[in-house]
Amino acid sequence: MGIVLNSGLNFNNMTTKFADSKVGTDLSIGINIVKNLNDNLGFVTGFEFDFSRLKYTFNDTSLYLYNDSKILTKSENNETYTLFQVKERTQTPIYLSIPTMFVFRTDYFGYFRYFAKFGMKHSFTLKSMTNDEGIISGSTETKNLTNMVLPKDLSIYKGSIGVSAGMEWNYYGTSTMVFELGYYYGINNIHRGDAITGSDSDKNKSLFENKDKTKYTSLKNTQNQLAFKVSFLF
C-alpha cells in the first residue's frame, strides 16, 4: 500500500442544449492498496479525495432564485427572493473515490516493470460550492455570486470505467514508485435530473427558462477524465 497523487483533465459530454462546458481540472490525494494474486496479477483498491473543477457557459436565458448564499430549488422558491440570470458557472465538488481495478504486470527488467490496469472508479459527492457570473433581474450590471450552496444539483454517485498503463520503479528494497497515465469514461450523469420520489419530478431543480417558472431544467453531463498518477508504494 502507499500514497497516491493524481492530476487530471475533465472532459464533459453535455447533452443539454442550453449550456456548454469547458475543460475542467482534477487534483486528488489518497491511499491505494494492492493485493497481489501472483507475480503478474493484482487487484487495486483504496480511497482518494478528488478536488474537481467544472466550468459551464449558458447559451440561453437560464434563471434561478437565490437567498443570501443559497441557490433555491423549485420546492424552496418564493417570490420574495432575488431572480438571477446566470451566464457562467464554476463548480468545485469534492469526491471520495474508491478504485476497483485489476493490474496486469510484466516481470522486472532490472529495476523496472510495466503494467496495465482495467476496472472502475466509484466516486461519491462529499461537498460542492458554486460560483456564478450573471445579471440580477432589473439590472444590466454583471454580478459575481461566490461560494453559493446548491446541495441537490450534483448526483451522489459518479461512476467511470478506467484503463491505464505505466511503469513501476523498484528504487529501494520493497519500496516502489509508480508512474501511470489513465483514461476514465463516465457512465452516468454527474448532475441530478428528475426526482425519483414524490409527485413533482422537478422539485430538486433550480434552473428555469422563463420568468414565470413553468419550465424547469437541469444540466446533463457525463464526464470523462485523462489522469496522470504518481504512487509511492511500500
Image: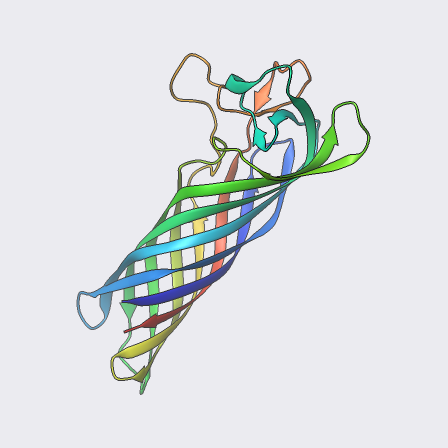
Q: Farthest residue toward the front?
A: 68
Query: Which quarter of the figure is the C terminus placed in?
Result: bottom left
Q: Is residue 126 above or below residue 2?
A: above
Quarter of the image for residue 15 reads top right
Question: Is 18 drawn above or below residue 94 in the view shown?
Answer: above
**Could you tell me residue 55's position as x and y percent?**
61, 45
Name the residue at 74% across, 31% down. Answer: 135
Residue at (74, 36) in percent of width and height: 143
Question: How many numbered marks are there?
Answer: 0
Taking 161 as reference, is 209 above or below it?
above
Nearest the eye: 186 or 212: 212
Q: Quadrant of residue 137?
A: top right
Q: Is residue 91 above or below residue 170?
A: above
Residue 61: x %, y % from top left: 70, 26
In the rendered structure, the answer to whether residue 42 lies left or right of residue 181 reads left
> Is residue 51 found left or right of 62 in the rendered image?
left
Question: x, y (%) of residue 106?
Answer: 28, 75
Location of the N terminus by quadrant is: bottom left
Q: Give me the residue at 51% from left, 50% from top.
A: 52
Q: Nearer the viewer, residue 18 or 206?
A: 206
**Residue found 69% across the figure and 27% down from its top:** 84
Q: Residue furthest left?
A: 38
Colour pattern: rainbow
